[in-house]
Image: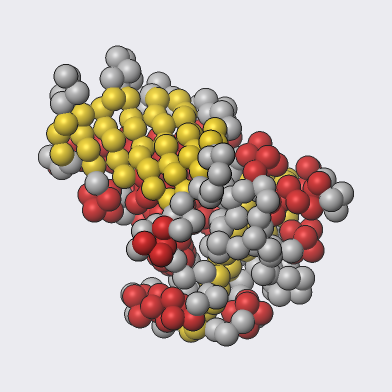
């Protein structure tokens, strides 16, 4: 057995392109909904005082992929330090012996696979001609989603809104013309969403910013920014008007504030989540059924996504002689 590989963020990005990521995430979502993997709810550890948390997300990804675990810290003060709020690792283990075979940068994996998961949901749920894109947020996930949306739909228009307009302008400068039309920076959420038939929300907010009436009939939304039961991006009326799909029904009903808050208030019921996206991929739910239907994919991120990504990236790194060897004994 060879030494363990340490695979840094740059190598993850080199190996895990958007097309490969979309294919691997399609496999992960289908396996999860087909109950051929084992994944508990994530374990979250919070300090007695101060902000931040540590999350541990283990999974068994099947006999061909084995065990893995993502361990990540969330530090809200990190942007002021020039760092991403999420820091951590994905560890992959040998299928026969359980020996750790690779440790990978989790920030890069999370950034890429989250956009890829939304791309899978967009392929399954968005109207075939959807291409008027609105992105709320201008951070790493906004960039990842812009690239992922362009991979699955020809974009006619791209509008971006961010609380910090300089960040939105920086996103536009980064994008240039590589995704088709130039990015239009908008001053308000309503202006960004006006007429958009493809929407990605990637915001670090507590109170919702997308209000009733802002979302066009027939639009598809990928909501990825609110990953705790106490925060949300979307007003209750927006969620109520949509047909809601999740990566994991169990996780969404336990951890997604966009759903948990209105359900606890008695405004929605748990069955408002009609299916997991994996069930659509497996043909167990039809997905979109009407042209004017608003579909909403609530993404929390699954350990199985990280483990399958980590195992695939490790295989590519070994075949190409990349990564840093780190013997354990």
Q: Looking at the picture, how far across and down is residue 252, in whole percent? A: 65, 44
Residue 47, horizontal then vertical, whole percent: 53, 40
Above or below: residue 273 compared with residue 165:
above
**In the rendered image of this protein, does residue 166 appear above or below residue 112?**
below
Q: Is residue 1 above or below residue 89?
A: above
Position of residue 34 measured from the top left corner of the image (x, y, whole percent): 57, 31
Residue at 73% in and 47% down: 260
Q: In what quadrant of the picture does the C terminus appear?
A: top left
Specify the farthest residue to the left.
321
In the rendered image, the vertical position of residue 70 relative to residue 8, given as above or below: above
Q: Residue at x 32, y 18 (%)?
A: 98
For residue 258, say whether it is visible. yes
Residue pictured at 24% horizontal, 46% vertical: 8
**At 73% across and 70% down in the image, what residue appears?**
211
User: In the image shown, does 300 or 87 lie closer to the viewer?
Assistant: 87
The colour scheme used here is secondary structure
Is 203 on the left-hand or right-hand side of 150? right
In the rendered image, which quarter contains the N terminus? Answer: top left
Residue 9 place in picture, x, y as percent = 27, 50
Farthest top residue?
97
In the rendered picture of this protein, how many numbered marks are placed on residues? 0
């Amino acid at each position: 057995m060879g030494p363990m590989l340490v695979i840094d963020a740059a190598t993850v990005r080199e190996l895990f392109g958007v097309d490969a990521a979309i294919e691997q995430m399609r496999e992960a979502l289908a396996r999860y909904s087909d109950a051929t993997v084992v994944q508990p709810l994530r374990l979250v550890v919070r300090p007695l005082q101060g902000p931040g948390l540590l999350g541990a997300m283990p999974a068994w990804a099947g006999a061909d992929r084995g065990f893995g675990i993502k361990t990540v810290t969330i530090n809200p003060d990190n942007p002021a330090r020039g760092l991403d709020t999420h820091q951590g690792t994905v560890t992959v283990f040998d299928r026969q012996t359980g020996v750790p075979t690779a440790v990978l940068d989790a920030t890069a994996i999370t950034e890429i696979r989250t956009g890829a998961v939304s791309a899978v949901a967009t392929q399954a749920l968005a109207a075939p001609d959807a291409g008027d894109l609105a992105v709320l947020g201008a951070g790493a996930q906004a960039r990842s989603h812009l690239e992922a949306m362009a991979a699955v739909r020809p974009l006619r228009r791209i509008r971006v809104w961010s609380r910090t307009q300089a960040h939105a302008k920086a996103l536009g400068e980064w994008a240039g013309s590589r995704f088709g039309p130039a990015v239009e920076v908008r001053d308000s959420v309503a202006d960004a969403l006006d007429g958009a038939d493809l929407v990605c929300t990637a915001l670090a907010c507590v109170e919702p910013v997308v209000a009733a009436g802002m979302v066009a009939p027939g639009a598809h939304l990928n909501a990825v920014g609110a990953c705790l039961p106490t925060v949300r991006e979307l007003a209750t009326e927006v969620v109520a008007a949509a047909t809601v799909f999740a990566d994991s029904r169990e996780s969404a009903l336990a951890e997604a504030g966009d759903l948990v808050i209105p359900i606890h208030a008695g405004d929605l019921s748990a069955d408002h989540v009609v299916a997991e996206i994996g069930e659509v991929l497996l043909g167990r739910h039809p997905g979109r059924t009407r042209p004017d239907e608003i579909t909403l994919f609530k993404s929390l991120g699954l350990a199985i996504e990280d483990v399958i990504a980590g195992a695939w990236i490790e295989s590519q790194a070994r075949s190409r002689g990349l990564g840093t060897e780190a013997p354990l004994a």
